[in-house]
Amino acid sequence: MNQDRTTGTPRRLPVQKRSLERFERLLDACAELLDEVGYSALTTKEVARRAEVPIGTLYQFFSDREGLVGALAARNLEAFLGRVTERLEREAPDGIAGLVEVTVDEFVAMRRTITGFGVVDFGAVGQDHTLEPGRDNNTAVAGRLRALTASLTGVEDDAELELALRVALECADGVLQLAFRTHPQGDPQLIAECKRVLNSYLNDRLRMLTSRHQAL
């Protein structure tokens, strides 16, 4: 099955150990080059050279540069969700405040430490449908966070919750971008303001959703 340019789904998934190692090396090389040369200068030829993988092998997995970047974004999202879930299970925080604290902290930690994450986190600049063809990147991430938020807060897991999370992600995206433009490690005051904005909006929105569902 060919890969859609707008999605993070590889055209062929690796099965054997050797293929999986090559696949991961290609994503690692892509991340390194994104930090070094940026998205606009990234080429599949240079990624294959850096990964020490034949260019033909790269095209067995990815149809083009956008497909490669999409797979990297998908890997980043899975890593982020794994980190968030692990912390939530370990710390068992209370309600929205705990969810906001964990998700923002883990995003910031990945931005500071994960190669290429500052250029491609869950999508590339100008590529609004990196993860899924039918939804923009923040909507796709919101969809993945729905069940997690519902289980932690007790609110109904529905489209209204996803909309609230989508708005929250857009807000967080803007403020955290500003935080990292202001300081290479993320301005602490702006990170704190991001949490304050998310707490205020989500607490208010989820109260409304809970009241509405109780009235039905």
Image: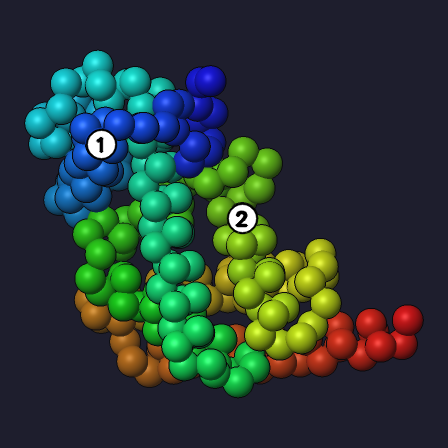
- Residue, x 21% and y 14% (percent of image)? 56
State whether residue 57 is above or below residue 23. above
Name the image quarter holding residue 67. top left
Q: Position of residue 14 (x, y in %)?
A: 31, 28
Name the image quarter holding residue 212. bottom right
- Residue, x 54% and y 33% (percent of image)? 133
> What distance separates the C-alpha of mark 2 from that of mark 1?
29 Å
- Residue, x 53% and y 85% (percent of image)? 94
Q: Nearer the viewer, mark 2 or mark 1?
A: 1
The residue that disc 2 covers is 140
State whether residue 145 is above or below residue 150. above
As rendered, which of 143 and 167 lies closer to the eye?
Answer: 143
- Which sits earlier in the primary sequence, circle 2 or circle 1? 1
Tell me the quarter of the image containing the C terminus: bottom right
Count residues near mark 1 (Cα–Cα under 10 Å), then give few for <14, some for 14-19, many for 20+.
few
Q: Position of residue 169 (x, y in %)?
A: 51, 62
Q: Amino acid at mark 2?
A: Ala
State whether residue 102 is above or below residue 17. below
Q: Amino acid at mark 1?
A: Lys
User: How many numbered marks, from 0 up?
Assistant: 2
- Residue, x 32% and y 28% (percent of image)? 15
Count residues near mark 2 (Cα–Cα under 10 Å), then give few for <14, some for 14-19, many for 20+.
some
Q: Position of residue 92 (x, y in %)?
A: 47, 81
Mark linked to residue 17: 1
